[in-house]
Image (cartoon, rainbow, N blue to C red):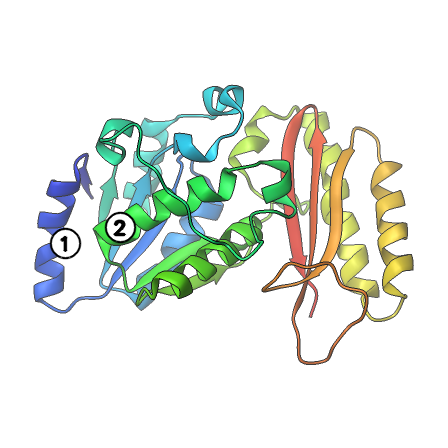
Amino acid sequence: MRIFETKKELQDYLETARINKQKIALIPTMGALHEGHISLLNYAKPLSDVTVCSIFVNPTQFNDPKDLEKYPRLIEHDIALLEAAKCDALFLPTVEEMYPDPNEKWHIDLNGLDAIWEGKMRPGHFQGVTQVVYKLFALVQPDIACFGQKDFQQVMVIEHMIKVKQLPITIALCPIIRDENGLALSSRNMRLSSNGKIQALALFKTLLYIKNNFGKIPLLQLNKQATELLNSSEGITLEYLAICETTTLKEIKTIEQDKQYVALVTARVEDVRLIDNMILN
């Protein structure tokens, strides 16, 4: 695996791939890698000739400086995982490399996607996400970019940005990887105790309850029952639970046959903020 710390080095490396008309896949990450991230790499391999993973803890998407400070940084562990998974290239830039102008301005109209759910709870978060992802897209110019379903709203935001900017990039929405009990793998899980991980399973169980009863129980009643299920679960502090149409992420009142739906949930366990979701049809 080749490791690049500057944009110039990575561009020079990728120039050969482009001359040879090779397909490039990008897997953008913030590090603290786990099996979920490696599944994105494995998904990309048969669809591309060159796999590029980026590790960059992007400061512009954190609205809480303490959260940025606490974010785990395990670069030696991450490099070992990527090497074992046979990643071709790792891009490992500094903040200064990605943001040479510390006062850089960025804003994109996200059609309301940045004003609901995660966007409402974390003002400015999705502007920061699109800012850094657009930089990575412009640099790598991938044919395909792989993102995990766990950050479902983030993927919808990036899909919208691709349409607005008319980028020739295919987004792959890769399935959530869960542990043997159903807990969605997340870099934040390492901040949970053993008991906290057990308590956090309430999110998965509630999503499963919604999926199993979607279309069988009236939506209002289903949402109420699922909310009660979480609120009565030990150690769970619920932030939101919603059943939404997938592209707009607007909460629904009726089910239409030709649309896709997703249940979104966010809760705190031991003061660690966890997100999860499940596609319902």
User: Foreground: 137 or 174?
Assistant: 137
Of callouts 2 and 1, the N-terminal one: 1
Residue 226 picture location, percent across and down: 84, 50
User: Foreground: 230 or 242?
Assistant: 242
Residue 39 picture location, percent across and down: 44, 53
Residue 47 picture location, percent across and down: 32, 67
Q: Is residue 260 left or right of residue 135?
A: right
Which quadrant would residue 273 be assigned to in this image?
Answer: top right
Residue 32 at least partly seen? no
> Looking at the rendering, in which quadrant would you find the N terminus?
top left
Residue type, mark 1 in image: Leu
Residue 175 picture location, percent across and down: 54, 58
Identity of the residue drawn at 55% across and 32% down: 188
Residue 204 at least partly seen? yes
Residue type, mark 2 in image: Val
- Residue to which mark 2 is pinned: 52
User: Foreground: 241 or 99?
Assistant: 99
> Looking at the rendering, in which quadrant would you find the C terminus?
bottom right
Which quadrant would residue 200 be assigned to in this image?
Answer: top right
Q: Is residue 171 left or right of residue 223?
A: left
Identity of the residue drawn at 45% across and 43% down: 127
In the image, which disc is placed on residue 142?
Answer: none
- Residue to which mark 1 is pinned: 14
Are the residues flagged by discs 2 and 1 in contact, CB closer than 8 Å?
yes
Disc 2: CA contacts within 10 A as few (<14), some (14-19) or many (>=20): many
Identity of the residue drawn at 83% across and 41% down: 230
